[in-house]
Image: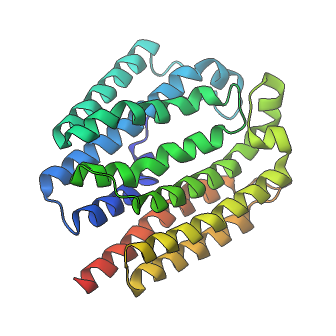
Amino acid sequence: MIKFEHSIFALPFAMLGMMWGAQGWPGWTKFGLIVLAMVSCRSAAMAWNRIADRDIDALNPRTKTRAIPAGLLSLRFANLFLLGSVIVFLGAAALLNSLALALSPVALLVTLGYSICKRFTPLCHFVLGLSLGIAPAAAWIGVTGTLDPRVLTLVGAVLCWTTGFDLIYALQDDDFDREHGLRSMPQTIGREKSLMMSRVLHLTAIGLLAWAGFLMGRGVWYFVGVGFAAALLSYEQSLVKPNDLSRVNLAFFTLNGFVSIGVFAFALIDWLTTH
């Protein structure tokens, strides 16, 4: 039901926020707690999504084989997994610092809220974007106990990037959403306009990534990473057409995983070569 590798979208950006906030390596304890908080929060969000959408998933040909509607996992197990993930997340936040603990309910509200937003607003994609976007700020808070306004630029970049690729993923379900009264941008404004919105968001994300590097005084290697991300996102956008969704999974899962890992890898090289 829960693929831990789904955390790969936000985790590298959390590691970037951690590295910038700590001015390098924060130590194994804080590193471990941040990873634990990230994975448990993401797992809670995925579990709640599967629980909240179980009846909808059962009706959708694309999702009816998911664990709960297919009968592979019981609702009771899913609820216990959700509860356990929330407890682990709150515990990790408490062990980091008081600000991380105080803001942990906000993080849960955002990350769990996406699943119900699509029932009443096509802006649900932006809620998902925010749920991943807060990762670098959360990691910064985890290592410093404070929030620096500069990291908010990185939050905006991840928000725009995530919203952009979720718009692409949502193209698969526009007919289903329309038939069952669910809200999404493709269902509301159509595939062509949704793809255009996705492209604008990805262009904005690249601009914000570059601006974050400028604010943090980063070097050449970081901006090479931004260029690498721009190239991958350009390729991703070329794969999907309004009348051809055959390569959506490549665009959604594979390329975006390389975007997040690539940006962090180049940022790490940049940090190691300048310190």
| Quadrant into which the C terminus falls | bottom left
Residue that appears at 47% across and 36% down: 111
Looking at the image, residue 202 sits to the left or right of residue 43; the answer is right
Report x, y in % for residue 202.
64, 63
Residue that appears at 64% across and 32% down: 63
Determine if residue 169 is in view.
Answer: yes
Residue that appears at 27% across and 40% down: 100
- Furthest residue toward front: 149
Determine if residue 46 is in view.
Answer: no
Looking at the image, residue 275 sits to the left or right of residue 118; the answer is left
Which of 9 and 3 lies nearest the eye of the viewer? 9
Report x, y in % for residue 140.
30, 55
Report the number of discs: 0
- Furthest residue toward top: 76
Q: Quadrant of residue 177?
A: top right
Report x, y in % for residue 33.
21, 45
Looking at the image, residue 270 sits to the left or right of residue 66; the answer is left
Residue that appears at 55% across and 21% down: 52
Q: Quadrant of residue 206?
A: bottom right
Which of 203 and 233 lies nearest the eye of the viewer? 203
Which of 230 and 275 lies nearest the eye of the viewer? 275
Colour scheme employed for the rendering of this structure: rainbow
Report x, y in % for residue 156.
53, 57
